[in-house]
Image: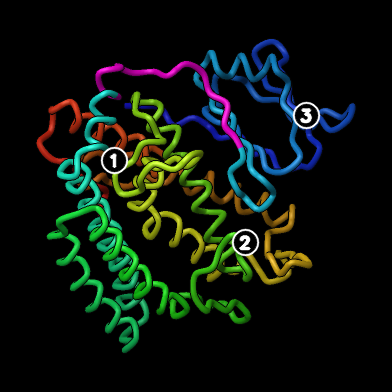
Amino acid sequence: MKKLLNTLYITRQESYLHKERETIVVKLGSEKLAQFPVHTIGNILCFGQISVSPFLMGHCAENGIGITFYTEYGRFLARVHGRQTGNVLLRRTQYRWADQQIKSTAIARLTVAAKIANSRSVLMRELRNHGENDRLSDAVAKLAISLRRAQHATSVEESMGIEGDAAGIYFSVFDELVRQEGFVFNGRNRRPPVDPVNALLSFAYTLVTSECVSALQGVGLDPYVGYLHKDRPGRASLALDLLEEFRAPWADRFVLTLINRKQIKQKDFITEASGAVRLNDKARKLVLTAWQERKKNEINHPYLQENLSIGLLPHCQAMLLARHMRGDVECYPPFVMK
């Protein structure tokens, strides 16, 4: 089983990263902020005005360490990675399947069904923990209908329509799950988010997507050719497909934990003149620290029946998808939370 390596998050503006022997050094001007052994790092995520030396980029590429650049809001800018790993025959199969309606629909249908099932599980968990709630109960019933529809979708377009309807149902009651006074959720908004809850959700989705890109590249798949999300220049469509399985059980629950345990508060956000809302530097570091800790938590994988770290879930699903494409397993088993 793949080892869970650390992800290095760089948020200090105007930081500079370079290689010193077998370590990665983070500096601000002439001040050394931190130093990490290269062999312990799996990915480097840079937010905002961060510089990386060309020599470190080359070394990371040679050793399979991804470097990704984002804006301070978490919008993807660019990714540096080395040679593509894996069997070219696997990627040729991936590309052929993306052009076949039957193959694309089969995977898209499973992806959407898993997303709806996981979203429904989050709402049902809330009902178990906090008692009956008419709005939540109604949403759970509607999502059960959406789940049945998703399992019988006959095209990618139909799957996308069902997914959109289900997301609308789920987010229409998401405010019932937010329990800290002062945090208001009136529906999903992004690009940019205009309230703290949406800012946290977008940031968490960015983090999961980065994990999915790395996992897919690690097994030899192309993260830019998907089935539910079709090709678009610069969009990691297959990584977004994989993300759908993890939105509710990983990202959404993580955000709700931060808010409801009051680890994050209203004062931790900055509102720009444009109305965009983002985490301040101190809060972003707190969120990333909590994210790293969350990745270390173990769960029992429902299909593999193995205990593994949450941070390895994208790798496991990427591996299972690759096995399906090779013909080792008859059907792709998406991640569905128990």
Residue 53 in sight here: yes
For the view shown, which residue lies furthest in the right direction? 30
Question: Is residue 88 located in the magenta-colored stretch of the structure?
Answer: yes
What's drawn in magenta, residue-wise? 78-91
The amino acid sitting under disc 3 is Tyr
Q: Is residue 303 visible?
A: no
**Helix or strand or loop: what does disc 2 sit on?**
loop
Q: Position of residue 307 (x, y in %)?
A: 29, 40
**Mark found first going from the N terminus, 1 or 2:** 2
Q: Check disc 2 and give the amino acid type.
A: Pro
**Few, some or many residues within 10 Å of mark 2 (<14, 14–19, 20+):** some
Whole-angstrom CA distance, mark 1 to mark 2, is 37 Å
Identified by mark 1, the residue type is Asn
Can you say whether 280 is above or below 175 in the image? above
**The N terminus, quarter of image:** top left
Alpha-carbon span between mark 2 and mark 3: 27 Å
In front: 188, or 95? 95
Q: Quadrant of residue 77?
A: top right
Secondary structure found at label 3 = strand
Q: Nearer the viewer, mark 1 or mark 2?
A: 2
Viewport quadrant of the C terminus: bottom left
Q: Badge 3 is on which residue? A: 16
Disc 2 designates what residue? 192
Q: Which residue is mark 1?
A: 307
Name the quadrant containing residue 317: top left
